[in-house]
Amino acid sequence: MMKSLFDSIQKLIGSGSRSLIFKYLARYGYAFYRIYENHNYEFDTNGEKQVINKLKNIGLNTVFDVGANIGDWSLMICKHFNNAHIYAFEIVPATYNIAQKNSLNYHNIHLYNFGLSNYLNTLQINVSASDHHINSLHNIHKLEFNDTVQVHLDTGDNFCAKHNIDNIDFLKIDTEGHDYFVLEGFKKLIEQKKIRIIQFEYGRVNIQTKTLLYDHYLYLRKCGYVLGKIYPGHVFFKEYDFQDENFLGPNYLAVLEDDSEVIKILSNN
């Protein structure tokens, strides 16, 4: 029945697909689809904050905030987990200075002015004077940057080895299209299952960096993680499907597949 209904609608649309009414229907349909798929980058309302709320009884001791920006996410972690050690990385010096001021009264935030990737390097980052949220190591289509700044990159594995960090409870990555490369830099810890929960961002910038959601699934599933998209109220864990490749974002979560307690807590509304 559903197939015949779909075929009828398709024929109807096909016969008048260039008409104004179908143009507006398509536009509003896509707008509703974006809402349905949680196209929302505000962590207070898109489900990220609720994920942290649900983990209060689990306890997070070692947390990484890669792409800390001005430090809001790290401060949220502090409010939920007073004793957590938070390692925050903000690559742009001007933004790092703001994050440093914001975290002055929080002794458990360790802030670093360099970025993480899959190799050690020094290169240029694109910087916007009007919106520090879009600073990126990549040239983003239709976004104008005012300047470039020389920055340094390390790998997660190298940083952890230097600081005697053996396990990470929560790794959050938000690096404007560079997330997959950051994951690769934690290769050793990920393959040894030493990172319990991983959050990464996925969206339109992934088109330019040529890192598909499929790549994230393929890599992390092979290493023993289950993946799910973060929605307000719950995380929807599922296997990858081609239709998931919609570049709408915003965030996905990976949890070790044998960590049934965390998976159950995060799955429930």
Image (cartoon, helix red, strand yellow):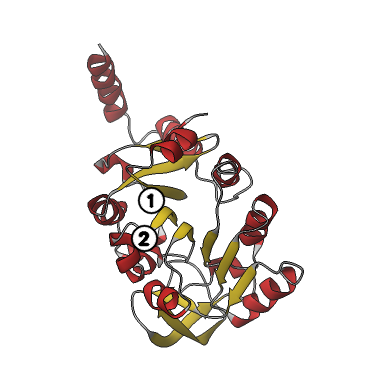
Residue, far right: 105
Q: x, y percentage for residue 252?
A: 42, 48
Q: Secondary structure at mark 2?
A: helix
Q: x, y percentage for residue 36?
A: 47, 34
Q: Secondary structure at mark 1?
A: loop
Label 2 vs label 1: CA separation? 7 Å
Residue at 40%, 68% in the rendered image: 178
The kind of residue on which mark 2 rests is Asn
Residue 24 visible, this angle: no
Residue at 52%, 67% in the rendered image: 67
Count all numbered tags in the image, as a single digit. Answer: 2
Is residue 170 placed above or below 234 in the rendered structure? Answer: below
Residue at 37%, 73% in the rendered image: 157
Q: Is residue 242 left or right of residue 89?
A: left
Residue at 60%, 43% in the rendered image: 56
Q: x, y percentage for residue 49?
A: 60, 46
Is residue 207 placed above or below 41 in the rendered structure? Answer: below
Q: Which residue is mark 1?
A: 247
The kind of residue on which mark 1 rests is Phe
Instruction: Between residue 207 and residue 83, name the one nearer to us.
Output: 83
- For disc 2, the neighbor class at 10 Å (few under 14, some 14 to 19, many from 20) is many
Whichever of callouts 2 and 1 sits on the residue coming sooner in the sequence is: 2
- For disc 1, the neighbor class at 10 Å (few under 14, some 14 to 19, many from 20) is some
Instruction: Between residue 184 and residue 202, name the one nearer to us.
Output: 184
Q: x, y percentage for residue 230?
A: 47, 42
Quadrant housing the N terminus: top left
Q: Are marks 2 and 1 in contact (CB under 8 Å)?
A: yes
Q: Is residue 118 left or right of residue 219?
A: right
Point out which mark residue 80 bears: none
Point out which mark residue 206 bears: 2
Residue 101 visible, this angle: yes
